[in-house]
Image (tube, rainbow, N blue to C red):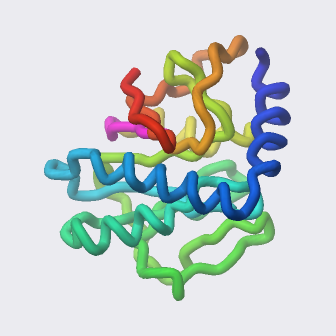
Amino acid sequence: MLKSAIRKQALKERLAVSDKEYELLSKSLLDQFTGLDFSDIKTLHIFLPIREKREPDTFLLIKWLTEVHPEIKIIVPKADFETALMTHHEYLGAGDLQKSLYSILEPQNGKVHSGEVDLVFVPLLAFDERGYRVGYGKGFYDRFLENTNARKIGLSLLPAIEKIDDVNEYDIRLDFCITPTEIIKF
């Protein structure tokens, strides 16, 4: 299946998820997430959810991280839609976030992080059994990931699809993907 078709189908499937089911799936995702080994992680990047699009509730993951691993520096993205690039900012809490024109929560006062990142949690609409993902199509994360040696972990409320047919040289493969039922290694 092609990315454009996958994008439409995955978004349709996610939007069909009820509020109750979304909450349960996000909690199950957290259960899987807590099984990861964070012992060698100093800095991690995590996206903030667009709840209207039923993205995984990463606030649950952030809350757990700040309680269990307060030594880990958490950074979150801020998108520049004119350049299609992201900057990465220290996460200062929900009070520092504001919705952009695209309804994306973004940090306002967090210091820009320009150092190394050990682990990146990557948003996606769908992923395949080989570890390739389909995002919203703007390439923000592919550009970011091509310049980092960080471990790349997708977060998905839906299971893997068999294959994305139009993968190209700009697509960056995930190392793992976490779903509500498992952690998949690629």
Specify the quadrant that holds the N terminus.
top right
Residue 162, percent from left and from top = 63, 15
Q: Where 6 sits versus 148, above or below?
A: above
Tell me what residue is drawn at x 58 percent, y 79 percent. 97
Q: Is residue 87 visible?
A: no
Specify the quadrant that holds the C terminus.
top left
Q: Does the magenta run of residues contain 151? A: yes
Residue 119, percent from left and from top = 33, 46
Q: Does the magenta run of residues contain 177? A: no
Tell me what residue is drawn at x 61 percent, y 51 percent. 85
User: On the image, which quarter does residue 143 sit in?
Assistant: top right
Tell me what residue is drawn at x 68 percent, y 39 percent. 125
| Residue in the foreground of this view, choosing between 157 and 86 | 157
First to last magenta residue range: 149-154
Residue 94, percent from left and from top = 52, 81
Q: Where 145 sits versus 44, above or below?
A: above
